[in-house]
Amino acid sequence: MPPRPASKPSRKRSNPDSVTSSATGPVPSASSKKKSSKEVDETDKLFDKYANASSGVIDPEGIEKLCSSLEVPHTDIRILMLAWRMKAERQGYFTKAEWRIGLKALKVDTIGKLKKALPELEKEVREPLNFRDFYAYAFQYCLTEDKQKFLDIETICQLLDMVLGSTFRAQVDYLIDYLKIQKDYKVINMDQWRGFYRFCNEISFPDMTNYNLELAWPSIHDDFFEWLREKQA
Amino acid sequence: MSRQNVKPMTMDQGFELIDAAVTKLKRILEGKPEPAFGSHEYIENYTIVYNMCTQKPPDDLSQQLYDKYGGIFEDYDKHTMLPSIMEKHDEYMLRELSRMWDINKIMVRWLSHFFFYLDRYFITRRSLPSLTEVGMTCFRDHVYNNVHFNVKQVIIALIHKEREGQQIDSALLKNILDLFVQNGKGSMERYEDDFEKFFLQETASYYSRRSSSWILEDSCPEYMIKSEESLKKEKERVTHYLHSTTEPKLVEVVQTRLLVLVAKQLLEKESSGCSALLRDDKTDDLSRMYRLYHEIPKGLEPVAKAFRLHVTSEGNGLIKQAEDAATSGSVEEQVLVRKIIDLHDKYMAYVTDCFQNHTLFHKALKEAFEIFCNKKVAGSSSAELLATFCDNLFKKAGNDKSNDDSTIESTIDNVVKLLDYISDKDLFAEFYRKKQARRLLFGRFNDDHERSILTKLKGQFGGQFTSKMEGMVTDMQLAKDQQTGFEEHIKNGNTGKPKGVDFTVNVLTTGFWPSYKTSDLNLPLEMVNCIESFKAYYETKTKHRRLMWIYSLGICHLNGRFDPKPIELIVSTYQAAVLCAFNNTERLTYQELIEQLNLSHEDLVRVLHSLSCAKYKFLKKEPASKTISKTDSFEFNSKFTDKMRRIKVCIRLLCLFLQWMIAVEDVDKDRRYAIDASLVRIMKSRKVLPHQQLVSECVEQLSRMFKPDIKMIKKRIEDLISRDYLERDTENPNTFKYVA
């Protein structure tokens, strides 16, 4: 989970119940077999273990608890992957519906099973087609305000590290260095964010010989390229 | 003889008779004494043949006659003609050949007359070559084929002699070469393969040698003269004896050797090459150069290139001169612009005269000017310098009567021409506009000149370029009318304008003029009344318009009633407001002034400084330091005097550097909008477009006004993406799609 302080009381909250019909009402499931409703029950029970009783959703505190149950640091990418699986809309919060979607997709209903399913989940997410989607999701997920389109540099650096750090260590390190030093960009938008992934994927590193300034790379990548070139000289 | 009674003639009989005739013919042809054929002999011979052909088979001897005919020629060619030619040399061989050729022609003619009957029936029936053909073919096979090689050698040797300046027998050569052509039987093959090919080779190496030695020894003009001569001589050679089809090939060979292969060396010759000729005004030589290279396909390109390089270096030299001469960062743009104009005139003259207005040279001139006209001179862009030049031109024109209208007109024409080369035209427009505003408001201006340059600019760059400037000039005209109306209005006793205050208002249309800041200055009562009265008048003229008063642009004439003597003060409205404050009180503190007048601190400090710490101290300041502080107090300096009766103290509200910065920023902002608009326009019509094409189309669209920075375009594209006008294609991130 990208590190956000667990307590941010002044944040605008979208109505968690707007996503599902109600936290306790009949579950709108695709199949109406008795067996699935048993599963759902288990899943719901698990949900309730971490959810905040009054708000009916898992809040940051609950997520932290979940993380320790899973024995995964709460800054770990796998929590983000889980959020992706759940199609969670709001950072730091899981609604019941989202919880159900996620756990059903992973075919788990206990903490133990969930923990065991994490490596599988990771493998699935790292598949190229999924990863692209996941990567864009990561950005989206961090946007807090309605109509917000940018993330600040600090967040981006952390996100880059978390999402791309394990596969593209060198690029991410240099990118983070650059982002911290430069003064031209105070925020990053989705297009530029996507560009980072493309850059890591397509451009050979550290020589960057196949980078072409004349193509349609967002300017921030051109600037990064020139900065790095100068550094290497 | 009657047919029935005569026995058929045998072959031997017939041939004997024919041989006799042939022998006689040969003797005649060889010039031996022999009486010519009479007409009865002619008929006899014809009849012999006729009879032998019309005899009933097996006595029809047509075939044999035909063969005999061929045999006669073959025999003569091989045993008489050929040896006689071969035993001669050089020119004599040629003459002999020519003679034999003529003999052959006559022989063919006579014998084909004798044997004519064959032609009529036998040959046509059997589709055999005609008698003439047989005769000519024999000659070709037995004489020509055996001699042409040697003959060719002789011809080429003779031509060489002629090239070296000796006389040769042109008529003879013409005959021989004609012979070559005719032996080709309708095609030019024999001529081309047996002669022309070798001739051209020889010509090529001849001129190669020439060219190598000339290029080292001669100057460029000398070389060109020699080349011109050579070409002329070769063309004459064609008319004298070569076949006309040789001309283009010959010209090409000579041109290649003399002009094309050495073009670079020739044009770049130190102290006499293209550059030097341009520099030294050698119009004849340049015209010759044009003439020579014009004929060669793509031949003018190196010349145009040399031209362009020369002009560019001249231009760069002027720029450098101006930079070196610039004192304390200020460039003498009057001098520089005039010099550039002169340079343009000089080289344009070359283009029109020496280079016959050829497009390549127009292009070269344009490219050269575009290079150095866009260089910065000591930090100032050329657009700005040109605008300053115009400003000074018009300002001086008002004062200097020696600068008559036609000179101004032609200078204006030149300015428009130069502007065409400058890529940042919008920057020029911005500076020009700002300076024009000052001219119109503060100086004397000549309406004709102002309109003239705008008309020309409009003609060249379009109405949008000049619309604001034209609006400004029109405003001044309207303002004059407005003022007259206002004064009429006052005379008719309307509204309370205080008598004794002359008040002139210029009403400006907001969009046209540069933006000026307004302020809530508290004016003295007299001025307020003036303003109110104009307002009232204006409202009778138009409703729906709001007047915004720009006091920072106003000028006041005050009577300074100083003790020693009264002096007229010409000051800005702000200064006047401050001075008039002292009409009611002797002494005012800074604080009081600020409250009374409602000026900003910066403005008040500047104004007070100009009135109390500068050259003319109309106010006394306590304490009498060099700077204004908020605790100062001021008093009317009644003791002030000067030898002048009228003093002008105007302050600029913004220092020059800031003005410049604002102009540049405004242009930048406009450019960003222009780029955005252009990008959206392009994407809207194309829907999908790859990045590079989008950028290049955008650059092209905008090139009329300025050269957009590629980085800026990229940034604007990104901005448009984040504003959801465009999006990247998911498959290909280098392509953009329009988001409707």
Image (cartoon, coloured by chain):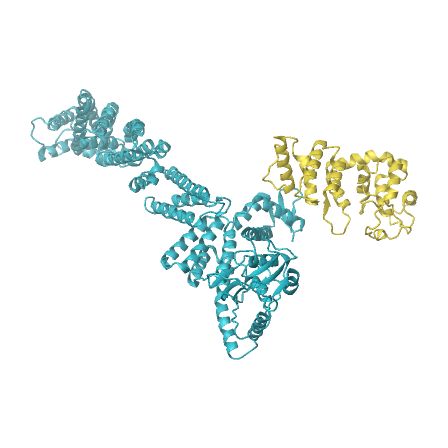
Q: Position of residue B639 (x, y in %)?
A: 53, 63
Q: Quadrant of the N terminus of chain B?
A: top left
Examine the rendering and report whether any part of residue B732 can be seen.
Answer: no
Q: Position of residue B153 (x, y in %)?
A: 25, 24
User: In the image, what residue occupies the spot 51% across and 54% down?
Assistant: B431
User: In the image, what residue occupies the spot 61% across and 48% down?
Assistant: B716
> Is the residue B701 above or below the residue B643 in the image?
above
Which chain is rendered yellow in the image? A
User: In the image, what residue occupies the spot 46% across and 47% down?
Assistant: B331
**Relative depth, front residue between B56 and B609:** B609
Q: Is residue B396 left or right of residue B471?
A: left
User: Disc count in the image?
Assistant: 0
> Is the residue A152 above or below the residue A127 in the image?
below
Q: Position of residue A164 (x, y in %)?
A: 74, 36
> Is the residue B488 above or below the residue B206 in the image?
below
**Relative depth, front residue between B108 and B555:** B555
Res B87 quadrant in image? top left
Q: Is residue B144 left or right of residue A35?
A: left
**Relative depth, front residue between B117 and B420:** B420
Q: Position of residue B553 (x, y in %)?
A: 55, 62
Examine the rendering and report whether any part of residue A122 can be seen.
Answer: yes
Residue situated furthest bottom in the rendering: B493
Chain B shade: cyan
